[in-house]
Amino acid sequence: MTVVLALPVAILAARFGGVFPMLIEQAAYLTHALPGLVVALALVFFGIGYARDLYQTTWMLLLAYVILFLPNALSALRASLLRQSPRLEDAGAALGRSPLRVLATVTLPLARPGAVAALALVFLTIMKELPATLLLAPPGYETLPGLVWGRSSNALYAGAALPALILIAVSAIPVALLVWRGDLGTIES
């Protein structure tokens, strides 16, 4: 969801100049400076005061993740689009394709390496996010970081070891796939 919401912002920022696209991009990056705890507490306040039906639901937790990690997805997508010439999209338009068809057949395939990297970045950061998950998750919702934190804060280190190992293994999968496919080199260079 975060990557899908970041895509239009990345396209605006990479392909269209001007004040409006720049303001939208900068607004998206503002949340990167906020700690997860601050965003979570703000959403707790919002949920209790104005959206009781959303409070401690998966939707509220997803909203927190989007707010916190949209900049991660945006930076990967934008970098991927900036590496590709906008003339490729111009060529598609010159061939008589509609703007939506150019988006579907030219722009989105060009953004694919960035989207893969964005998915991996967002997945990895969500896997380790603790404050927002603890404060906003529905009752009884267990995550690996929550288990590790809960057990280690109670000095149950042996009980925290297996969830920590699983967390490392699950987090290593997207990184290994990106390295194996070579997508990290595409984004970094």
Image (cartoon, grey):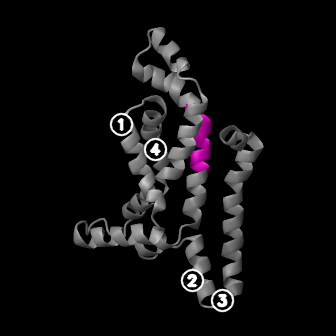
Left or right of residue 30: residue 110: right
Nearer mark to the viewer, of 3 and 1:
1
| Res 46 → quadrant | bottom left
Quadrant where the C terminus sits is: top right
From the image, give the main secondary structure of the stretch colored magenta: helix
- Dot 2 falls on a residue whose secondary structure is helix
Closer-to-camera residue (160/91): 91
Find the magenta span and give its range: 111-120
Contact (CB < 8 A) between labels 3 and 4? no
Q: Which residue is mark 4?
A: 6
Most distant residue in the left direction:
50
- The residue identified by callout 1 is 19
**Foreground mark, 2 or 1?**
1
Amino acid beneath label 4:
Ala
Picture coordinates of residue 60, whole percent (x, y) = 37, 63
- Residue sitting at the far bottom: 155
Relative to 185, is 35 above or below? below
Give the residue at x 58% y 63%.
127
Observer-side mark, 4 or 1, equals: 1
Q: How far apart are labels 4 and 1 at the CA level?
A: 18 Å
Q: Which mark is in front, 2 or 4?
A: 4
Residue at image position (55%, 54%) is: 122
